[in-house]
């Protein structure tokens, strides 16, 4: 499956960010490769503006609440 609205976060993190609702919202997920599937764990959901604030503070790599 391919998601055009998803980007892998840098710094060797195991997280991916999805653009939702026409890029108005963002969802950060942690991913884990299983034997047959990729597992996604939701770590944070918020507006694009809230995500931009997280990025300025460098919190997108370790936030675990939504």
Image: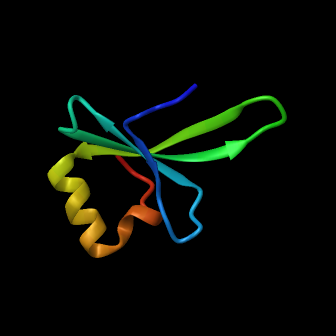
Q: Position of residue 39 (x, y in %)?
A: 65, 36
**Which residue is farthest right?**
35
Q: Residue at x 37, y 37 (%)?
A: 5
Q: Relative to the observer, which residue lies in front, 65 or 27? A: 27
**Which residue is farthest top?**
1
Q: Residue at x 20, y 31 (%)?
A: 22
Q: Which color mode does the image show?
A: rainbow
Q: Position of residue 29 (x, y in %)?
A: 49, 45
Q: Residue at x 35, y 73 (%)?
A: 58
Total numbered labels placed on residues in the image:
0
Q: Position of residue 31 (x, y in %)?
A: 61, 45
Examine the rendered structure and indicate whether residue 63 appears above or below residue 6: below
Q: Is residue 5 left or right of residue 3?
A: left
Q: Residue at x 17, y 38 (%)?
A: 24
Quarter of the N terminus within the rendering: top right
Examine the rendered structure and indicate whether residue 21 appears above or below residue 42: above
Dividing the picture into quadrants, the one containing residue 60 is bottom left
Examine the rendered structure and indicate whether residue 28 appears above or below residue 55: above
Q: Position of residue 13 (x, y in %)?
A: 56, 63
Examine the rendered structure and indicate whether residue 35 appears above or below residue 52: above
Q: Is residue 19 left or right of residue 34?
A: left
């Amino acid at each position: 499956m391919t998601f055009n609205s998803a980007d892998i976060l840098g710094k060797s993190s195991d997280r991916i960010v999805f653009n939702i609702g026409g890029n108005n919202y963002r969802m950060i997920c942690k991913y884990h490769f299983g034997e047959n599937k990729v597992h996604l764990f939701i770590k944070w959901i918020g507006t694009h503006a809230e995500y931009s604030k997280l990025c300025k503070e460098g919190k997108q790599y370790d936030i675990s609440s939504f």
